[in-house]
Image (cartoon, rainbow, N blue to C red):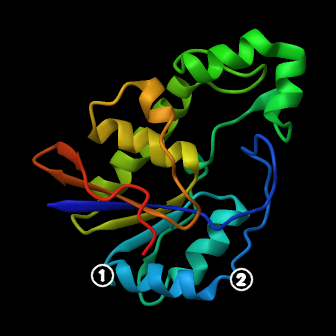
């Protein structure tokens, strides 16, 4: 059995739709980082997206773990023209569009951004490649959308129900893979 530990990066304190904007993480909660580091297996490989908030978070918990190169395929959803805007700002100009985006996740994308299905199509092959490279456990420091995309693979949740899950900063979502079957372990666990 292989385990996939999905860690959401430390908080950025930014408000709004933050996807590919490269913001630093606030890693001042050293107690939370210590608990996270202690909870995770020491022999696991560790990878992050190429955005600074995940790189910094991964660095804070690397310890003796094997660090893999950053992967751009593990970035957050690309919000396109909605990037850095609040829900209210987007709703003021595109209420029907943003409602479809959240209520019918799938093929609806922000203008010049990506849809839920496009995010899943980008992330899942990278996760599969990383898992196939070695039979050991894998820790992925990533983003809300990336965590949800893999959680959906391990559960029977619809896209709508998956999108509604709460995933806190510095939380762990664990997926177990055995004989190509994915099952969820803890979800949004903050040790």
- Name the front one of labels 1 and 2: 2
Q: Quadrant of the N terminus?
A: bottom left
In the figure, residue 103 lies in which quadrant? Answer: top right
At mark 1, the secondary structure is: loop
At mark 2, the secondary structure is: loop
Single out the residue that lies furthest toward the top.
96
For the residues labelled 1 and 2, the Cα–Cα distance comes to 26 Å
The residue under the point 51% across, 35% down is 164
Q: Which percent across, then down, holds residue 110?
A: 73, 22
Single out the residue that lies furthest toward the left.
179
Residue assigned mark 2: 28
Q: Nearer the viewer, residue 128 or 36?
A: 36
**Mark 2, other Cα within 10 Å: few <14 / some 14–19 / many ≥20:** few
The residue under the point 69% across, 58% down is 51
Q: Nearer the viewer, residue 176 or 52?
A: 176
Q: Which percent across, then down, holds residue 133?
A: 30, 59
In the figure, residue 60 lies in which quadrant? Answer: bottom right
Q: Is there CB contact under 8 Å for labels 1 and 2?
A: no
Q: Return the disc, 1 or 2, that comes first in the chain's sequence.
A: 2
What numbered label is drawn on residue 163? Answer: none
Q: Which percent across, then down, holds residue 181?
A: 16, 42
In the figure, residue 101 lies in which quadrant? Answer: top right
Q: Is residue 104 above or below residue 176?
A: above
Residue assigned mark 1: 43
Q: Quadrant of the C terminus?
A: bottom left
Q: Nearer the viewer, residue 160 or 76?
A: 160
Residue 118 lies left or right of residue 41; in this view the side is right
The residue under the point 72% across, 19% down is 98
The residue under the point 10% across, 47% down is 179
């Amino acid at each position: 059995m292989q385990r996939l530990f999905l860690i959401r990066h430390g908080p950025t304190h930014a408000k709004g739709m933050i996807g590919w904007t490269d913001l630093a993480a606030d890693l001042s909660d050293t107690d939370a980082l210590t608990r996270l580091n202690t909870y995770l297996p020491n022999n696991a490989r560790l990878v992050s997206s190429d955005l600074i908030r995940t790189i910094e978070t991964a660095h804070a918990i690397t310890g003796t773990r094997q660090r893999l190169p950053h992967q751009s395929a593990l970035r957050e959803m690309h919000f396109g023209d909605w990037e850095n805007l609040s829900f209210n700002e987007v709703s003021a100009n595109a209420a029907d569009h943003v409602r479809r985006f959240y209520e019918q996740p799938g093929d609806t994308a922000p203008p010049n951004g990506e849809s839920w299905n496009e995010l899943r199509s980008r992330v899942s092959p990278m996760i599969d490649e990383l898992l196939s490279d070695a039979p050991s456990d894998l820790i992925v420091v990533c983003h809300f959308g990336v965590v949800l995309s893999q959680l959906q693979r391990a559960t029977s949740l619809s896209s709508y129900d998956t999108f509604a899950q709460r995933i806190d900063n510095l939380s762990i979502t664990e997926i177990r893979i055995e004989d190509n079957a994915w099952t969820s372990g803890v979800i949004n666990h903050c040790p």
